[in-house]
Image (spheres, rainbow, N blue to C red):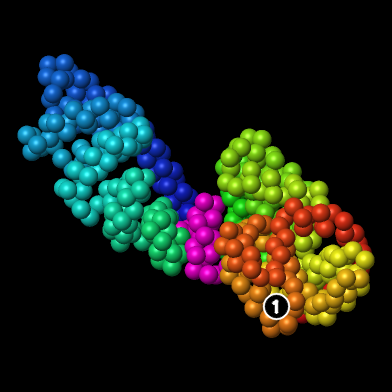
Amino acid sequence: MDFLPLLAAIVALAGVVLFAMAILGRSRKGGKGKDRDTVIKNANKRLSQNPRDPEALRDLAGMYYQDQAWDKAYKMYETLIGLATNHPGVDEFEINLRYAISALHLNLLNEAYKGFAVARSLKQDDFEVNFNLGKLEFQRNNYEKAIQHLNQARTLDPEHAPTLRCLGHALFKIKKYKEALAFIRKAIELAPDDKESLFTLAECYYEVNQTDQALRIFGHLRPDPAMGPSACLFSGSINFKNHRFDKAVEDFEIGLKHQNVKSEIRFELKYRLASVLLRQQDIGMALSYLREIQDVHPNYKDVPLLIAKYQELNANKNMQIYLMAPSAEFVALCRKIVLNYFPRAKIKIANIEVNKNEWADILAEVDTPKWSDLVMFRFIRSQGSVGELIVRDFHSHLKDVKAGKGLCLSVGNFTDEAKRYTEARLIDLIGKEKLTIFLNAVDAKAAKAGGPAKK
């Protein structure tokens, strides 16, 4: 029972203490405000008598700096910089540091750089100075200098996410991808919402041949409004390079569905999507994307050449097969041309050889009312110029199989050297114009029904 009076006394005493603290707090607050007003009043009074009074400028600049009135603080510290060297009572390091920070808030980057540089010459181990100098050097594309300052800032504060971020990005810029990986990964752990760093991390993974990790991150970023289009472009390009064409098409199409895509990224998404569609022989859809690019950017990369090349193919199915189809379909078409090349002739195909995806050699026994002989056909798939070396190789093959005549066919053209080489030899060079006539006369379905030839 004696405990209750003691408890009541403690509660009463606590109430008195709390009340006293509240009164004291209000008194201090009022006093601080009063001191602040007094400082400003005294400083302005002294400045009215001497506009270059260093102590008055320092006191007034300090008030503006605390209030984050950056424009006023900047002007005050700018004046103080010119006075600091002749007044030992003014802290030159603090004046230059605050001048630089005020300039930075006003986006006066050159002035901020000068202030931080002077501050660092006075004190080299200050975190704020080294971090901001590193960041400014990065913005100036001086990545080596940025790395130097940022590394020093990191030793002073190893867990400062912006320092780690900027350091990682600077290392990425100079292609030190493995070093960049470590810092960017740590920065993301401290600031998980940094999508730009996440994108750069994926780029680092790609550069060090960790493609799966890169694709995983790019896939995660595809829906992001800001980073999504670039992530889709990168992801699609990786899949395209690795012949995963369906996935590449999906990536590029998702990228194009984003709103407010930068024009250069939109052009490249359409261009690469068209490239994938051409590989898939979807020429009509590819041409639609290429024409969309040409309507806005007529000379974008090789778009005019691609349109000129593929709109002809789009109108000629057999030309598509000849140039783009798998080897079996190509050979089936060539067989059909051979069987219909000589009118009123009995033709028996004796042998077929395919050289990778470059050409097919077909040896045929030809029997006409006037002559009979072994004839070798070489069907070249390239649209470029056929030179003397290919024709020489063909002539050598003719002699090996003891063919009496050779026909070399191409949708490209033959060089002058190739033409001169065949002048005294039993080889006919068949160019695009005549080959196109044969292609137009061939039924593609019948050619395909001929079945794949054995290589």
**In the rendered view, would you say 24 is above or below 35?**
below
Is 324 included in the stretch rendered in magenta? no
Magenta stretch, main secondary structure, is helix
Q: Position of residue 336 (x, y in %)?
A: 86, 66
Q: Nearer the viewer, residue 439 or 240?
A: 439
Nearer-the-camera pick, 228 or 9:
228
Q: Is residue 315 visible?
A: yes
Residue at the extreme top of the image, as rendered: 48
Give the residue at x 23% y 39%. Answer: 114
Residue located 53% across and 70% down the image: 209
The picture places residue 312, in percent across and down from the top left corner, at 75, 48
Mark 1 residue element:
helix
For this orientation, the residue located farthest to the front is 370
Residue 144, percent from left and from top? 31, 56
Disc 1 crowd, CA 10 A, few/some/many (<14, 14-19, 20+): many
Q: Locate residue 349 relative to residue 102 in the image: left or right.
A: right
Write the residue at 28% across / 57% down: 148
Q: Is residue 327 left or right of residue 69?
A: right
Say which residue label 1 marks: 398
Indicate the position of residue 376 as horizontal and vertical percent values.
76, 74
* Front-most of residues 114 and 87: 114
Instruction: Residue at 73% x, 83% y: name it.
Output: 401
Q: Quadrant of residue 51?
A: top left
* Amino acid type assigned to the residue bearing label 1 in the image: Leu
- In the image, residue 406 sits, relative to residue 7, either above or below, namely below
Q: State which region is magenta.
A: 187-212
